Image: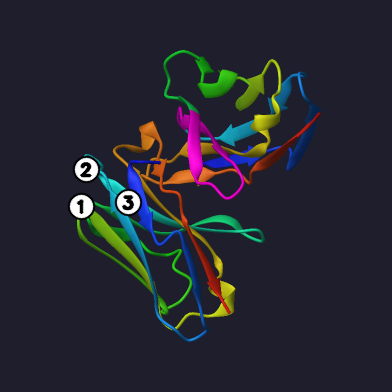
């Protein structure tokens, strides 16, 4: 997982607060993906970028969720305001080409109380 | 449309016995296929990948998978399970849109 660094590893926040999750990928990739994982729904693709441009955000659950990728080395996923049902593990992943699979970060475990 | 189906949500084996995790896919073209493993509270790690070269693919930790086009399968096997193999396993296909398509996952339990 050294190719993708996510921060923070754990986040506990109160309902209504803004949460920002960060992802720092290594260079040499074309695409970056944000996933959410819960026991109930498994892995869900939220959004993905290709060459820093958002391509498909149909998985973003609501307007409370937003993602940016200002450059090839940094991306954020923001939830504002957060709700308890947003509690999940959020993964960032990168890919140079879909045939080579993804490299996943270690994830951010978000708990909204 | 492409889809990936893992046939078992939960598999339990005894340590030292073979492991078989089943995966079927559907695709209108020759796909790229992967197996990922996720240990508790960890990220997803690539076990192995098939990209239309050899149909028998060897991965890390003694795992291998065989691509069988006639059966549209890509089952994951290991001759002898180890306690450390207990984890969630995902069969994944690469779509032509740049996105990966995940199976539902199979939880492997290894009993002493």
Disc 2 crowd rating (10 Å Cα; few below 14, some 14-19, many 20+) is few
- Of badges 3 and 2, nearer the viewer stands 2
Q: Residue at x 79, y 28 (%)?
A: B13
- A4 in relation to A69, above or below: above
Q: Residue at x 40, y 62 (%)?
A: A8
Quarter assignment of residue A67 = bottom left
Answer whether residue A60 is visible to the viewer in this image.
yes
Q: In 3D space, how far apart are the residues under numbered discs 3 and 2 (Cα atoms)?
A: 11 Å
Q: Secondary structure at mark 2?
A: loop
Residue, disc 1: A72
Disc 3 crowd rating (10 Å Cα; few below 14, some 14-19, many 20+) is many
Q: In 3D space, how far apart are the residues under numbered discs 2 and 1 (Cα atoms)?
A: 7 Å
Mark positioned earlier in the residue sequence (1 or 3)? 3
- B24 in relation to A77, above or below: above
**Stretch of the chain drawn in magenta:** B29-47
Discs 2, 1 touching: Cβ within 8 Å: yes
- A8 in relation to A85, above or below: above
Q: Chain of mark 1?
A: A
Say which quadrant the C terminus of chain A sits in: bottom right
Mark positioned earlier in the residue sequence (3 or 2)? 2
Q: Residue at x 25, y 57 (%)?
A: A74
Answer whether residue B66 is visible to the viewer in this image.
no
Q: Are marks 3 and 2 on the same chain?
A: yes
Mark positioned earlier in the residue sequence (2 or 1)? 2
Residue, disc 2: A27
Residue, disc 3: A32
Task: Point out residue B49 in the picture as x, y percentages from the top left corner.
Answer: 47, 26
Q: Secondary structure at mark 3?
A: strand
Task: Point out residue A64 in the picture as x, y percentages from the top left corner.
Answer: 42, 79
């Amino acid at each position: 997982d050294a190719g993708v660094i996510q921060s923070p590893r754990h986040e506990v926040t109160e309902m209504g607060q803004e949460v920002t999750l960060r992802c720092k990928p290594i260079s040499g990739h074309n695409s970056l993906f944000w996933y959410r994982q819960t026991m109930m729904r498994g892995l869900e693709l939220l959004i993905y970028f290709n060459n820093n441009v958002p391509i498909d955000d149909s998985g973003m659950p609501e307007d409370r969720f937003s993602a940016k990728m200002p450059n090839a080395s940094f991306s954020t996923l923001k939830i504002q305001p957060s709700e308890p049902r947003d509690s999940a593990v959020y993964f960032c992943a990168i890919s140079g080409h879909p045939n080579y699979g993804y490299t996943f970060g270690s994830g951010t475990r978000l708990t909204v109380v | 449309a492409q889809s990936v189906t893992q046939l078992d949500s939960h598999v339990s084996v005894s340590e030292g016995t073979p492991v078989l995790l089943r995966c079927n896919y559907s695709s209108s073209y020759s796909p790229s296929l992967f197996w990922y493993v996720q240990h508790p509270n960890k990220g997803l790690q690539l076990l192995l990948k098939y990209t239309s070269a050899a149909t028998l693919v060897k991965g890390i930790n003694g795992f291998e998978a065989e691509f069988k086009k006639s059966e549209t399968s890509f089952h994951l096997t290991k001759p002898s399970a180890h306690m450390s193999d207990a984890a969630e396993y995902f069969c994944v296909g690469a779509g032509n849109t740049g996105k990966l398509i995940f199976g539902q996952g199979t939880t492997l339990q290894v009993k002493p």
